[in-house]
Image (cartoon, rainbow, N blue to C red):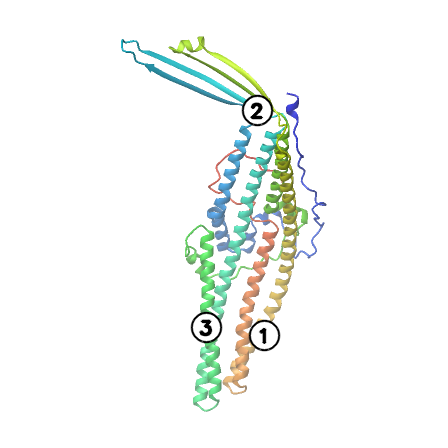
Amino acid sequence: MLTSGCVVGPDYHPPSATALNVPAAFNAASPGSPQADADLGRWWQGFADPVLTQLVDRALRANLDVDVAGSRLRQSRASLRAARSAELPSLDFGGSVSRSIGRDGGDETSFQAGFDAAYEVDLFGGTRRSVEAARADAQGALASLHASQLSIAGEVAVNYVSARLAQARLGIARENLAAQGETLQIVGWRVQAGLVSSLDLEQARQLRAQTAASIPAIESDYVAALNRLAVLSGEPPGAVTMLIEATGGIPAAPSAYSTPIPLEVIRRRPDVDVAERGLAAETARVGVQTAQLYPALRLGGSFGGSGTSVSQLLDTSIGSLAATLAAPILDGGRIRAGIEGQRAVAAIALSNYRQTVLIALEEVENALTAVSAADRRAGEIGIAEGAARNSAVYARSQYRTGLIDYRTLLEAERSLLSTEDASATAAADRATAAIRLYKALGGGWQYAPEPSSVASSTFTARPR
């Protein structure tokens, strides 16, 4: 009883922020003003786009990858319950009834019944370390579910922006195609009148054909984004087409973002939690292996009897108790090799955890820089778009009056198409950069609904 309090193997302690090289602040300046964590948990609502909100909420409820993660969580919780059962005694009952038929009517009925009990005393904590490892695995599975929810929310938002960008580009291309068609008609009249050469006509035809040729590729991108959104929502391709084909522009990125502290980001991101719980589980398994070096005490007992009637079972019953103490003496170094191998696995888990932390910090740094760059680029392209639109209006007017040649008009129309397309792309890049920042900060799983594949059970996640 005294030795049952002993637990061999290393006690797990999470690595400190200093050991993980977590800086006090990010190098990239955080744009905007800080927001509350509650806003970060539902960051897609900050885009003020009801269709986007509807799609993300639908995907978090019905996405099949999230459902798979929920099933894995359910499996890990069952494994935890199985590990805990090893801490309790086992009790088996067996019974039988037989009847013998004699020639002279000497029939006889026999009854047999018995109980068997077994219990292995956890002298050196091997079972407790197994439970500790199983608990860490279950907590890691919960974090994996959160990571899946975070990823799905971000992927839905990115594909929604892609769909809206394709819509905007289609509108730009079709408007320019119509304008170029009018210009082509005017050039044709001028050629017939002998005012310009056929070279202007061929150049106008070339520009219009190039614009028309770009439309099928954009339409393909649009359909691909719609189909991806449907599958992310757990539905067949085409299921969300009617929802998105309604009028809607590229969602505007919020003007303010959460000002992150690196340590808070590390604590919030579920992928980091998955790696940390994996390290805790592998550290506990070192103790499981180490416990095999020490004696194992097994207690057993049986109680049973037999007779020709139920009342005779107690009269003829006998019982036995046994205690077995077994300890390894010679095993050729198998146990110590297992311990060394498990220590190596724990070292791998530690390196994986540190690498996950570094990648998380890198993603936030890159996302902060991308948001700042996208904001600056969108502002400059907006100026260029206005200038290109005015230039095209002036060029068309002057060409009709013969003040400029077609080459000048051609360059103005090409510049307008390119600049309008770049402006739409810049708006989408700005929204996408904001989405990636929110994802890098670890937002999007905090208020996600529990998937249907997770059975209700008593389970407490690791405190954050």
> Which mark, by number, is residue 120?
2
> Which mark, by number, is residue 317?
none
Residue extending farthest to the left is 104
Give coordinates of residue 183: x percent, y percent.
47, 80
The residue under label 3 is: 213
Give coordinates of residue 245: x percent, y percent.
44, 60
Determine the residue positioned at 53% across, 81% down. 409
Q: What element carries label 3?
A: helix
Determine the residue positioned at 46% across, 11% down. 317
Give coordinates of residue 146: x percent, y percent.
55, 45
Identify which amino acid the numbered label 3 is placed on: Ala
Q: How far apart are the alpha carbons under marks 2 and 1?
A: 83 Å
Q: How many residues crowd mark 3 within 10 Å: few (<14), some (14–19), many (20+)? A: few
Front-most of 163 and 365?
365
> Which mark, by number, is residue 387?
1
Q: How far apart are the alpha carbons under marks 3 and 1?
A: 26 Å
Give coordinates of residue 246: x percent, y percent.
44, 60
Identify which amino acid the numbered label 1 is placed on: Ala
For marks 3 and 1, give the one nearer the viewer. 3
Whichever of labels 3 and 1 marks the residue nearer the N terminus, that label is 3
Determine the residue positioned at 50% across, 67% down. 169
Whichever of labels 2 and 1 marks the residue nearer the N terminus, that label is 2
Q: What element carries label 2?
A: strand
* Disc 2 and disc 1 in contact, CB within 8 angstroms: no
* Disc 3 and disc 1 in contact, CB within 8 angstroms: no
Whether residue 192 appears in this view of the structure is yes
Whichever of labels 3 and 2 marks the residue nearer the N terminus, that label is 2
Residue extending farthest to the bottom is 194
From the viewer's perspective, is residue 409 above or below residue 321? Answer: below
From the viewer's perspective, is residue 210 above or below residue 95? Answer: below
Front-most of 286 and 227?
286
